[in-house]
Amino acid sequence: AQTVTQSQPEMSVQEAETVTLSCTYDTSENNYYLFWYKQPPSRQMILVIRQEAYKQQNATENRFSVNFQKAAKSFSLKISDSQLGDTAMYFCAFMKHGGNAGGTSYGKLTFGQGTILTVHP
Amino acid sequence: GAVVSQHPSWVICKSGTSVKIECRSLDFQATTMFWYRQFPKQSLMLMATSNEGSKATYEQGVEKDKFLINHASLTLSTLTVTSAHPEDSSFYICSAILLWYEQFFGPGTRLTVL
C-alpha cells in the first residue's frame, strides 16, 4: 500500500513571495504519477500539476513547479510570486501507473493530509 | 476542460431519511467514478469506486448498506445515504476518470443531518 505524508499542516506567505510545500511518499511501485491538487474555499478540487515518475525532468505550470526526488521519495511544490488566489488547501496525491478499467487500483488516488496555505497581502 | 457536476450542492435532511446525491460527467463518458467523504480541514477519504454496469467496490470500513452506489450509465453515478444520522453529516465529493491518469472532481455536496 502507498502512503503520502504532508508534514506541514499550515503555511503562510506574503503576496509575491515564494513558498514550498513538502510531500513525501512511500511505495514499492516503480511506475506511478504524483499530483498536487488545490482546494480553495469553494472546495472545488483543482489539479495544479502532475509528474510522471519515469520522467526525470521536474514538471512546471506557470508559477508552480515541483522538485521530484524519486530516490528520496520526495515531491515538493514551489509556488512563485504568490497571489491571494493561491490561498487554499493543497493536497499531494499518488497514483499507481496503469491498470484496466474496473481493476481494483485503476485511477485510485492516495492523498496526503493536506497543507492549508494562506497568502497575506 | 472536462466538467463534473454534483446535485444537490447542499442538502439538509431529518435523521432516519435517505438522501440521494448525483454525480454527472457533463462532456465525457466515465466508466469509473469515485466517491469521497471529507471533514473540515481534513483530507479526502475514498469511500468507494463506482464502475458502470457493475457493483461498486467499497473501501474497508465503509458500510455498503448505508452508502448505496449505483453507476447506471457512463455519465451518471449516484450515492444514496440510507437512514441518515447526524454522524453522516459531511462533505461528499465525486470524481470521474477521463483518462486513467486524469480525473475531474465535482464541486461537492454538503450534507447536514438534523
Image: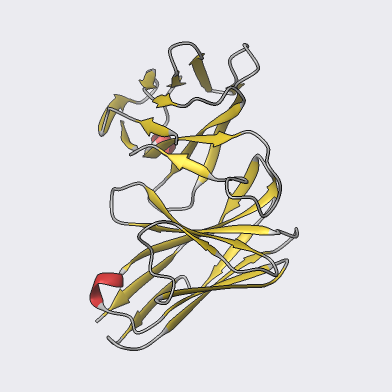
Above-or-below relation of B91 to A103: below
What's the residue at 38%, 63% (across, down)? B62
Above-or-below relation of B100 to B64: above
Q: Position of residue B36 (x, y in %)?
A: 45, 57
Residue B107 appears in view: no
Residue A36 appears in view: yes
State how the image is colored. Answer: secondary structure
Q: Position of residue B22 (x, y in %)?
A: 56, 73
Q: Quadrant of residue B100?
A: top right
- Nearest the viewer among B7 and B68 is B68
Above-or-below relation of A66 to B42: above
Q: Count the marks: how many?
A: 0
What's the residue at 38%, 37% (across, down)? A112
Residue B59 shown left or right of residue A118 in the figure: right
Q: Position of residue B78 (x, y in %)?
A: 56, 73
Quadrant, the C terminus of chain B? bottom left
Q: Position of residue A117 (x, y in %)?
A: 33, 34
What's the residue at 49%, 38% (across, down)? A37
Above-or-below relation of A63 to A91: above
Residue A110 shown left or right of residue A14 in the figure: right
What's the residue at 25%, 34% (across, down)? A9
